[in-house]
Amino acid sequence: MEAFITPPPKIPFYLRPGIWLARKITGKDLLPPKLLAWYPKAAIGSGVLESLVANGKKDLDKRILKIVRIQASFAVSCPFCIDMNSHEYADCGLSKAELAVLQGRADIDKVGTFSIREKLAIEYAKCVSGTPLSFPRPLIDRLKEHFTERWISSFRSSKLLFLSGTSDNVRVFLRRFCSFTQ
């Protein structure tokens, strides 16, 4: 994928540490932070948003977080997000068969390794990634049955926070980055 705009010739000095940190964390020279340098306030806001996202520390499950990020990326068909979020999927214990489910190439019921909570997280990530937003009452009831209120609130809070927040962030990057690409 190639951007149809180029980064500004001179990146503001106060954005350079964030771009360096993104490269260090991801191991990749990312184009979106450089493109956002055209509008530094958006770059700073995106950096703050990314730093607040749920990252699987403390009581948040890294595997479910990875599943949600990958599912949201595929749901919105964002190549950048797919690349970033499915990178090293096996490190979170995801198998190739499970990845195929998230890609929509396999039936979730034929891959018996997802827990009930993971299946709910996948379903919720799809709902949050859809347009228009739709949350069937039975799904909400099952979420309440299998997740604590803290988890459910963190679903929304770590990027506006965890499940739907993660999906929100994927959609934000989709709109920001893919709008500059062909």
Image: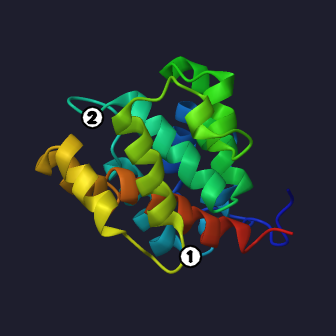
Give x and y (percent) for residue 145: 18, 46
Viewer-nearest residue: 135 or 85: 135
Relative to 114, say whether 70 is above or below.
below
Q: Residue at x 87, y 69 (%)?
A: 182
Question: What's the amino acid at mark 1?
Answer: Tyr
Relative to 173, say whether 83 is above or below.
above
Would you say 151 lies left or right of 6 here?
left
- Name the secondary structure under disc 2: loop
Q: Residue at x 82, y 65 (%)?
A: 3
Residue furthest left as drawn: 149
Residue ID for mark 2: 60
Q: Residue at x 33, y 50 (%)?
A: 162
Residue ID for mark 1: 39
Q: Residue at x 67, y 47 (%)?
A: 82
Would you say 3 lies left or right of 173 here?
right
Would you say 110 lies left or right of 5 here?
left
Residues at marks 2 and 1, CA–CA distance in whole angstroms: 33 Å
Give x and y (percent) for residue 64: 40, 35
Image-quadrant location for residue 173: bottom right
Image-quadrant location for residue 147: top left
Would you say 88 lies left or right of 105 here?
left
Q: Residues within 10 Å of mark 2 (few under 14, many from 20)?
A: some
Give x and y (percent) for residue 179: 72, 74
- Name the secondary structure under disc 1: loop
Give x and y (percent) for residue 1: 85, 56
Q: Earlier in the sequence, mark 2 or mark 1?
A: 1
